[in-house]
Amino acid sequence: FFVRWSSSSVHCMARKRSARMMGVPNSEQPVHHDGPDDVLAAAKKKERVKARWSLLREALIGSQSSAAAKSKHSMNSFAGFQVLDRTVIQDTDEFRVAKCHNEDEGQDGEASWDFVQNSYTCKQGGNIQFVTREVKQHPQQSQQQCTPQSSMKSRVEALLSHRNHGVDNTGNVRVWDAEATLAGFLLSVLLSEEFDNESETDQVSSNIAKVSDLRSRIKTALFANEDSICANVGQETCNVLELGAGQAGLAGLAVASATASLDNMKLLQLVLTDGHPKCVENNRACSKLMPERKDVSIDSQLLLWDSSAKGAEECQRIIKECRKKPSLDHSLDEGLFHICLASDCVHFQEFHDSLFSTIARTLTVGGVALLCQPKRGSSLANFMTLIDAVNKASTSNGPLFHVEMIEDFYPKVSKMHRSLESTNAASTSYNPDWHRPLLLVMTKLRSFDEDVDGELAQKVVKTYITK
């Protein structure tokens, strides 16, 4: 679970290992050796497999073998793009402890948590800060290891999280870099940060136009219309949903912090969701650390992505809860949210149809979903294939989503990516496939049809996960 394995992935590895022990041919093993390159490739694969089995062993028994020997085989080996300045606050303010203490935390109590100051400063000098409560990280340990105090029971529970809770445990392990990158991008937009396109992005004009248009749309969704402000009419509301928010909901809380700090922004209704109950509980703690404001409402809800009728009911429950707020408009469309945020959520391909349907059910027509994540093999490409298949099949109603993939959406990330790629690959732990965040933008064009769009999405996912 620490390297983003589902329980099914562990079982698959076990079956392959058993097959090798019984002499059954494995299609992934080289069947011939044409030369030195084949021998080297086979040796590297053997090293990867050994290191990953070592990671799994550590997760189960809590041993602490050499981190250096296996760090390059873990997704956590790269420190990230550090778009946000994130600093652990050393003091133990009674106010924070009182607000965030959870009686059900167990033996570790509040000692297992860090308070992290998240800060973003734009080039023109504007600054946004907010505090989150996160699982304490131990520098002397590799990030994929659990704490020494963890019992065998808790480690096994984490490994079987998908079976017990219907979702993996990765959101409880750490804050992933794609989440911080998306949070920083949103803050750069809301602070109206200006970049030197030629020197910092080095991109073609079409990409610059895409980013400029997206930034304008985000600001339109979140900032109040000047005409309505001058006319002194009722203030508008922007509804923002974060899916798979993990333990800290950085992207959503970044928007809430900006709303509380900047002038002329719409009322904000923010809903942080995750499928794991521990993440939901910690998101509630993080939201309590935000300054109380009448123009910002933050809620944390349990939401499992599910393409079935049960999943549709859960999405309706979230929408109905939000509509109880007197400041919200009653839209005729089944969706309610103007912006949907998700970070590193397309990794597990067996849940693609459920994620797709959840976005389509909750997003209002004209609303935009921002998904920030690395490619991670074929996972991102297959998710885009799913969207494309649904769009092309809807001949009578038209496409459901307008889709754009933006690789260079934030200058610091693009510049650092090019620098890392130019260095010797053997001397760095950076792997663009694992680590470089890309921005997938989905704009909803029409209402979602459960019987047509939903069923087709399920069929498409079955075709590529069974290959």
Image: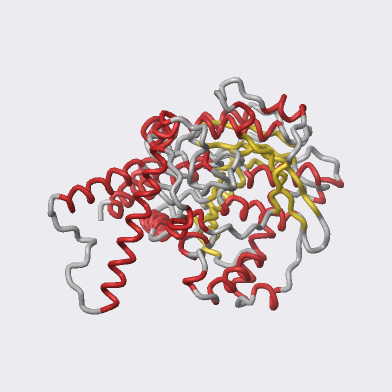
Q: Nearer the viewer, residue 447 or 320?
A: 320
Residue 124 sits above or below residue 237 on the image:
below
Position of residue 124 measured from the top left corner of the image (x, y, whole percent): 82, 62
Q: Nearer the viewer, residue 260 or 11?
A: 11
Position of residue 320 measured from the top left corner of the image (x, y, whole percent): 57, 29
Which quadrant holds the C terminus? bottom left
Q: Is residue 178 visible?
A: yes
Q: Is residue 395 visible?
A: no
Residue 209 sits above or below residue 356 on the image:
below
Position of residue 238 measured from the top left corner of the image (x, y, whole percent): 68, 42
Residue 93 sits above or below residue 116 on the image:
above
**Residue found 60% across the figure and 39% down from its top:** 136
Residue 426 sits above or below residue 144 on the image:
below
Q: Quadrant of residue 214?
A: bottom right
**Residue found 15% across the figure and 58% down from its top:** 25
Q: Residue furthest left?
A: 23
Position of residue 177 measured from the top left corner of the image (x, y, whole percent): 57, 53
Q: How many marks?
A: 0
Q: Residue furthest top?
A: 103
Left or right for 280, reference 37: right
Left or right for 413, reference 291: left
**Residue found 41% across the figure and 28% down from its top:** 153
**Residue found 70% across the figure and 77% down from its top:** 199
